[in-house]
Image (cartoon, rainbow, N blue to C red):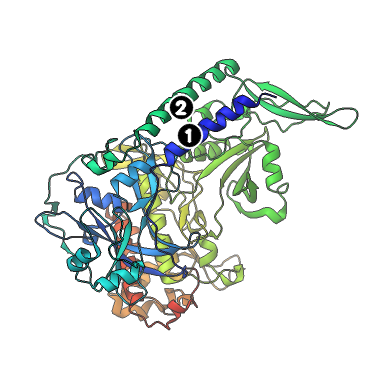
Amino acid sequence: MYPFPNLLFAFLFLIVAHTVSHNHAYPTPMNCTDTSRLCTSFLAFKPEPNQTLTVLLSMFDVSPSDITVEDPAKIEYVFIKKNCSCLFSTKKYITNTTFTLKTDDGFVSDIVNGAYDGLAMVSNTTRRAMIGGVVSLRLFCGCSSRLWNYLMSYVLKDGDSVQSLSSRFGVSMDDIETVNGIGNPDNVTVGDLYFIPLNSAPGVPYPLENGIDAASSPAPAPAFSIEGHPGNPQNPQNKARVPYGWIIGGIGVILVVIILCIAVLFLVRSSACYVNHTKDSDGKVSHKFHILRNPSFLCGSGRYICCKQGDWKQTNGESSNNQINVPRVLGTDILDVEKPVVFSYEDVLFSTDGFSDSSLLGHGTYGSVHYGVLHQQEVAVKKMTATKTKEFLAEMKVLCKVHHANLVELLGYGATNDELFLIYEFAQKGSLSSHLHDPQNKGNPPLSWITRLQIALDAARGLEYIHEHTKNHYVHRDIKTSNILLDGSFRAKISDFGLAKLVGKTGDGETTVTKVVGTYGYLSPEYLTNGLATTKSDVYAFGVVLFEIISGKEAVICSESTKTKNAERRSLASAMLAALRNVPDSLSMSNMNEYIDPSLMDLYPHDCLFKVAMLGKQCVEEDPVLRPDMKQVVITLSQILLSSVEWEATLAGNSQVFSGLVQGR
């Protein structure tokens, strides 16, 4: 009836979208077909003066031994060693890292592109930056077709050419042209991504003085500029390319949109509307708009803008107990979190096929979990009774404030007066437990050694994040293999934060005293004794997880006569510790064959498995002071994974690892 405003909004949207997307052209990553492929790669990076070794370690998620330098005197270029894999969903070679934003000026994609100088990308190019936000990134890498040992990602700079790169890295021009499909060596583009084939690792060790970055003392985080290319404020060429007309026009359009939004908000004030569908006496459907006094709320990570919160009154004379207002039992505490998306009961019920048995994924301590599809997105819906308000709010308060690639994402919630629902992203491969403990009876192929290590590293990174990098530090209190979920690419995410607790600083570290909850076999001695929950309690539980990854056994081992009342039950931790006492080094691994998962079929490097076992032993030390923190665990697992990948590269091409007989890659 009034088409002009709609056309105006559409026109304004197109202009803004064009303005925003104008500078989001990423380099083209390398194609791949073998999604089981994993290799060692390098990235050539030219750091800014204030990007010291400490900053680089954080930016690329590596240890100091993974960074070499082209010229120790100038540190003009550094070479980052990273594991590279073929991403299943895109069939492109990528490697992952995370980046903590130090500014809220602009879009995340612009800041990332500037900080990593074209070597990284984010999936969402329209997300605004937020100080302290942790962004999951994909770094461009490549795996060689085995004609060379390594490929190095390199973004072409002014003055670079195929000939200069050939001379600089000691490789032939023909090899560079072959890898990159260059038909004319004179036709290369500054800012594009190219891959340099190498037969040996580039550079020399990064210069250190007493273990400290020799380039400079600890410096502030990288600075970003809106002039020219972000992160390169002095680059006149980038500055010259800025489309001022589009920017000025875009700013004007944005101001107009803001004014219109304010006008709309003024008209509707604090009310929100929804469409109510009713049938008249002739059976025809009519649409009535009802005003709700309480508008919907959004979670910081929520993807859906849909929600209706408030009283939902029936207009057909029927009563309903399934209102979508927040039940009184929740009180007002729920409003303390970064506002979560609210789904209607009808949406949740429909998405799970009425919570039918066919949609059931499993039963947890506090309710059942069902598979569903909401707004064309696969989800997992945890259904709890209203008596589980404490656990419900615990997950809401943590997952609406804490976001990381290795933590399961909370998408929203639903609630009636009798039931509570939490809606999560769906993990296609299920739990780690189902892949370790009798996997074939559960329809799962056994996991390879490399995949097990990657899962362990992912879970360790998720734990490290909630222990050290969030504004408020948390202890999970229920780390176990059934709470480590796997996505379609077997990447791990920690779930089930119903028992998570804030931990406060004391003279002895971070601790909180609570009643003892959790799962037997994973509980640390000090927690069992006095309810002292610390980050080291989570470390203990993670050590048990490492033992499960090695052995394929559950956290509690039962004797053969498990059906009798007097069946002997023994913790896996105590059994592994006893076995390790008889294994002084990796050459004596035969002494603990009973505790190595037979489904590995001896396809693992014995020294690496021994190192993981010793790491697990450190994690379950009786004295929590002797246990490593999760940051140390992450570094150790990263190094073991790298060694394992190098071991795999030494195998013959017809080995079972390469042929895919060992699944789960």
Looking at this view, is 75 or 466 the one in front? 75
CB contact under 8 Å: marks 1 and 2: yes
Residue 256 is situated, as x and y percent measured from the top left of the image, at 48, 23
Judge left or right: residue 640 versus residue 268.
left
Residue type for callout 2 = Val
Q: Quadrant of the N terminus?
A: top right
Question: What secondary structure is found at the residue carrying circle 1?
Answer: helix
Circle 1: is it few (<14), some (14-19), or many (20+) Cα within 10 Å? Answer: some
Circle 2: is it few (<14), some (14-19), or many (20+) Cα within 10 Å? Answer: some
C-alpha gap between disc 1 and disc 2: 8 Å
Q: Which mark is residue 253?
A: 2
Residue 491 is situated, as x and y percent measured from the top left of the image, at 46, 58
Q: Quadrant of residue 132?
A: top left
Rendered position, 403 above or below 296: below
What residue lies at 23% left-to-right and 73% top-to-bottom?
A: 172
Question: What secondary structure is found at the residue carrying circle 2?
Answer: helix
Q: Quadrant of residue 279?
A: top right
Looking at this view, is 148 or 390 the one in front? 148
Q: Which residue is mark 1?
A: 15
Judge left or right: residue 312 versus residue 365.
right
Q: Which mark is residue 415?
A: none
Rendered position, 138 above or below 322: below
What residue lies at 79% left-to-right and 25% top-to-bottom?
A: 315
Q: Quadrant of residue 414?
A: top right
What residue lies at 47% left-to-right and 53% top-to-bottom?
A: 493
Residue 299, visible in the rendered structure: no
Residue type for callout 1 = Ile
